[in-house]
Structure formats: C-alpha cells, structure tokens
Amino acid sequence: MNHPFTGTGVALVTPFCADGSIDFEALRNIVDHVIDGGVEYLVALGTTSEAATMTAEERAKVLQTIIAHNRKRVPVVAGVGGNNTAEALHLLKQLPDGVDGILSVVPYYNKPTQEGMLAHFSAIARATSLPIILYNVPGRTASNMKAQTTLRLAHDFPNIVAVKEASGDLLQMMEIIASKPSHFALLSGDDALTQPIIAMGGQGVISVVANAWARPFSDMVRHQLANRTIEAQGLHYLLLETINLLFAEGNPGGIKALLNSMGLCENVLRLPLVSVSDSLRARMNEQLHRINQNLKP
C-alpha cells in the first residue's frame, strides 16, 4: 500500500516582515523552494509556523495562501488541534477546500490521561473524513501518548493514518511499528532521527530542516525508504550538525536564521520567541558554507 504521507513533509515556517506582519511573498517563495526541492507534501500551521502567535484570521490567510500557491502540486496537511476538544472540532468545520489531511497534536498543558487522549482523538476522527496524522511531542505537551494508545486509535479509526512521533523513544516507536495496522504509518518528528527511524520501519518525516535543505534531506529519506542505506547515511551525516544547531536555541529560531542566510525570509519571530544568538548563527553559517561546498556537482 502506497501511504499518502510517505516521504518528506515539511513543517512550513511563517515568514514575517520587519514590522511583524506576515510576509506572504516570502511564504510563496518558500513553498516553491521546498516543492522544487522534492518534498512530498506540505504541512501548514504546525508548531514551526508560530501559529500560536497568530490570530484566527491570520492562520486562515496563511493556509489559504499555501493552498492557492501550491496549485495542487503536492498534498497539503493543516495543523488542527489544541487542548480544547470542542474548539478543535469547530476548527475542522472551518477548513477550506484544498486541505488533504490534518495534523493533530496531543493536547498540551491540560495533561490528559491516556483515556483522555483516546477520547479527544476519537472525537476528532468521528468529526472528519480527512486522513489524520496524530502528533506526539511530549517535550512540548508534557504528556506522552503511549504506544498502546496510538495503536488503539490506529486500529479503531481507518482515517487515523499516521503518527508523527517526536518522543525520541525508539523502543516506543518500534512497538508501534510492530503492531500497527497496514493503513497506518509512523513518521519521524525529529530530523536527526529520521534516517534510523525509517531504517527500522518508519515511512517518512515531517521535517523542519527541509524548509532550507529540501533537496538533500528529501533525497536522504527516499534513499532510506528504498533501502539504499549507504547513500542515505551519507546525506544524514552531511546534514546532522546543521540539524543539531537548528534546535540548539529552539524552533523555529534556528530555521528562520538559516532561511535568512539563504535569502528566503527575514530573521523575524514573534514574541515570546526571539532570534538565535550571533554565535549560534555564525556556526550555522559555517555549516551552510560546508554543505554548499559538498553539494556542488
């Protein structure tokens, strides 16, 4: 079965102008950059987008801009979730045409039990026919969705088609891969672990670094999916230091600094996020030069 979200999805940043307004021209340029770089699908309004700092109207305009500029070249996944189940169900009803799936995070701050997570995602699955990617990121939510909960949801709902796993727990991921139904995929939620996760049975990634390095990162994913491990490892280790630096002072501060150095957007974030330090940016620019040299034909 060819899973709809196999390969590389990119968690798109939201570029801002110097005055803090949304830079829609830069957003369209980044959409072209990642599609031209070979990613398989786009993810709008995820954590990397700084959606939490946008108004409802801004989020709607960002999603509409991505859909319109994409022109059905690749699938578009929209972030729809939160820690208020009723609000998430309301947001589902507002989705425009052109959304091909949703990414829904484990509720944060409330710290629900496993039964609470099960009830939350069951309600979302019953409210839409769109394919759903669950998102487990305990470093941000303070709650880990256990493998048994993910598997119950995967077996109970055919439109729950994947989990973006960012727990860092490879044993938990292997438990999911070993017992998942055939329609369900495990996707890496950590760029640095993507190659080994695919090697053990994962089917792709929702990536931050692919905003910048779309071509080499998505090539790495395709190599590993095809069991060309030597080629995949070469690209994995070429990008690994940059990936580590991207997250050293938080996401999306790192990726926005890199995109700015590449001429793709301003280095502007909305509070409470701030730009990365000058020393980190200098190290990232050294990696940018190194990777450019290594990628020359």
Image (tube, grey):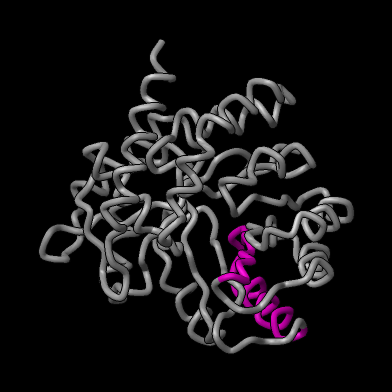
User: Main structural element of the magenta stretch: helix, strand or loop?
Assistant: helix
Placement of 160 over or under 288, stated as above or below: below
Residue 131 occupies quadrant: bottom right
Q: Residue furthest right?
A: 179
**Residue interval drawn in magenta:** 115-139
Residue, x 38% and y 58% (percent of image)? 252
Q: Nearer the viewer, residue 94 or 81?
A: 81
The x, y position of residue 182, in whole percent, is 82, 48
Which image quadrant: the N terminus?
Answer: top right
Residue 20 occupies quadrant: bottom left
The x, y position of residue 134, in whole percent, is 64, 64
Q: Is residue 162 left or right of residue 216?
A: right
Is 125 magenta? The answer is: yes
Placement of 44 over or under 58, stated as above or below: above
Placement of 214 over or under 167, stated as above or below: above
Q: Is residue 230 left or right of residue 90?
A: right
Q: Residue furthest left?
A: 19
Residue, x 37% and y 60% (percent of image)? 49
Question: How many numbered callouts?
Answer: 0
Which image quadrant: the C terminus?
Answer: top left
Q: Is residue 88 left or right of residue 123?
A: left
Is 209 magenta? The answer is: no
Q: Nearer the viewer, residue 116 or 65?
A: 116
The x, y position of residue 107, in whole percent, is 58, 79
Q: Residue furthest front?
A: 279
Placement of 98 over or under 34, stated as above or below: below
Q: Nearer the viewer, residue 279 or 268?
A: 279
